[in-house]
Image (cartoon, grey):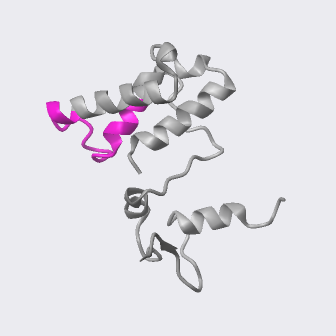
Amino acid sequence: PNGAGKTTLFNVVTGILTPSAGSIRFMGKDITDCSVHEISRLGLARTLQIKSVFHGMTVRENLWIAAQSRRGVFRPFTGLKACRAANERADALLEELQLTHLAGQEAANLSYGDVALLEIGIALATEP
């Protein structure tokens, strides 16, 4: 129901908000004071209701950018090894999510369901 605190709960668990009391534990570890990035690296990630895809880019490009972002937003092109890893991750996610047939399609032209799958892929591409 509206106003039940679902969004607040997710924001606290993922480190976007700091709890005013108590602590947050994940897999036995206290993550209360961890940054959003530290929490993401522990395996907690979320998608937002606001669409997070680049509509002018293809499905594969969206996944590739997300895979590269794991290495740092301002260091996307850190070498051939990183590019290969991002290519492999994007291709693996295309197969996993059964989006291979849409790899070259611009995100703007996807159905609502395919956009939702792409958003899941983007979240997974960061290897949370």
**Would residue 75 be counted in the magenta stretch?**
yes
Task: Report the number of discs.
Answer: 0
Q: Is residue 32 above or below residue 2?
A: below
Quadrant placement of the N terminus: bottom right
Q: Is residue 93 above or below residue 43?
A: above
Residue 21 point in image, percent of width and height = 59, 86
Q: Residue at x 71, y 62 (%)?
A: 6
| Residue 105 appears in the figure | no
Q: Residue at x 41, y 71 (%)?
A: 34
Q: Residue at x 45, y 42 (%)?
A: 124
- 74 to the left or right of 125: left
- 1 to the left or right of 53: right
Quarter occupied by residue 39? bottom left
Q: Which residues are magenta?
A: 63-82
**Would residue 111 be counted in the magenta stretch?**
no
Quarter occupied by residue 69? top left
Residue 16 point in image, percent of width and height = 53, 64
